[in-house]
Image (tube, rainbow, N blue to C red):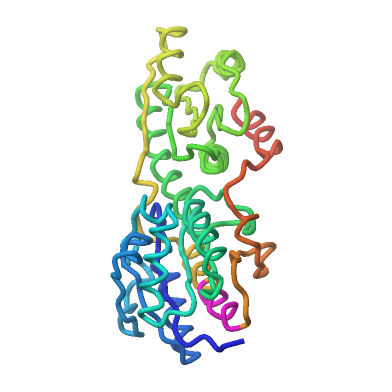
Amino acid sequence: MTPIKKIGLFTSGSDSPGMNAAIRAVVRSAIYYNIEVAGIRHGFEGMINGEIIPMGTKSVSNIIQRGGTMLKTGRSEQFKSPQGRKLAYEQLKKNNIQALVALGGNGTIIGVKEFNEEYPDIAVIAVPCTIDNDLRGSDFTIGYDTAINTVIEAVDKIRETAESHDRLFIVEVMGADSGMIALRTGMGVGAEAIMVPETKSDLNALFERLERGRKDKTSKIVMVAEGDEPGGAFEIGRVIMERYPNYDTRVSVLGHIQRGGKPTCMDRVLASRLGVAAVEALMAGHTGEMVGLIHDDIAFTPLGQSVKYHQDVNAEFIRIVEMLSL
């Protein structure tokens, strides 16, 4: 096995809080092991265009607390084609890059999986960075903890104004295919109901819950993942307003606020652990895998098995929400 002398590092797809902490961990641990690091700006597109810069210890100073990604991110239609991946490979070889550390979510993992299959001489380790927490191979993904805490803070404020006006709020959170944000934050804010893509939403059951709730409870919160099949918060709000015109109903879409902000301590620690593990994995000969944390232990999952999947909704969460929201 040829020793790794130079690693290419990039972020791709949607940003998530903690990406900068992971960048810092990869760069500094690589330097600790006398490995060069080249930062690739703007994800796969930057790889194709040769946007490659040297990175040193000082280049990642004072970024652990910052949201977003200093390397910038984006999506690339070019990289989806064999011709685009060939251009990226040529740029990597031109810059003497022997291995890649990819920070991102489902799209990033699909991209590096295809690249690694076509060009196995470039070792690849992926680090899971997505607020959706929907990748197999890690109990939590980088950015998820920050996102759910952002939601909690926002909905606590919504609850205060809801109480003041005796209102029902339909709150939409991110999760086009995953209800992990809605499920956990719904319990955390004491929501009356939670609607997620993983389960078929029964509007009649929602109406029943709203009707049988305490009559003296002046505010109500319904948490909705954006991918829920009735059509998201606005559609659910429209149906509720038609059914209950006497309710003072409002819709609030939290949107991209969930992606921003300073990462929590949990995300900074997770990013630091996984960044170091990615470098050490490459040194040990790992490739074509995603590094994650399972039961607090570092674990590796083949890229083909770590892509987005629908988790079974934790029935215990739903049971507790129904019990405590009465």
Q: How many marks?
A: 0
- In the rendered structure, the answer to whether residue 132 lies left or right of residue 21 reads right
Judging depth in this view, the residue of 108 and 242 nearest the camera is: 108
The overriding secondary structure of the stretch rendered in magenta is helix
Judging depth in this view, the residue of 308 and 321 nearest the camera is: 308
What is the x, y in percent for residue 184?
A: 56, 43
Q: Is residue 145 visible?
A: no
Give the farthest residue toward the front: 83
| Image quadrant containing the C terminus | top right
| Image quadrant containing the N terminus | bottom right
Q: Residue at x 64, y 28 (%)?
A: 322
Judging depth in this view, the residue of 315 and 130 nearest the camera is: 130
Q: Is residue 120 magenta?
A: no
What is the x, y in percent for residue 241?
A: 41, 12
- Vertical position of residue 208 compared to residue 27: above or below: above
- Say which quarter of the image contains residue 316: top right
- Give the residues drawn in magenta, as a range: 275-283
Q: Residue at x 38, y 68 (%)?
A: 20
Give the farthest residue toward the bottom: 34
Q: Residue at x 41, y 64 (%)?
A: 86
Judging depth in this view, the residue of 126 and 227 nearest the camera is: 126
What is the x, y in percent for residue 62?
A: 32, 75
What is the x, y in percent for residue 220?
A: 48, 25
- Vertical position of residue 242 compared to residue 80: above or below: above
Q: Is residue 153 visible?
A: yes
Q: Residue at x 61, y 34 (%)?
A: 198
- In the rendered structure, the answer to whether residue 51 lies left or right of residue 2 reads left
- In the rendered structure, the answer to whether residue 17 lies left or right of residue 195 reads left
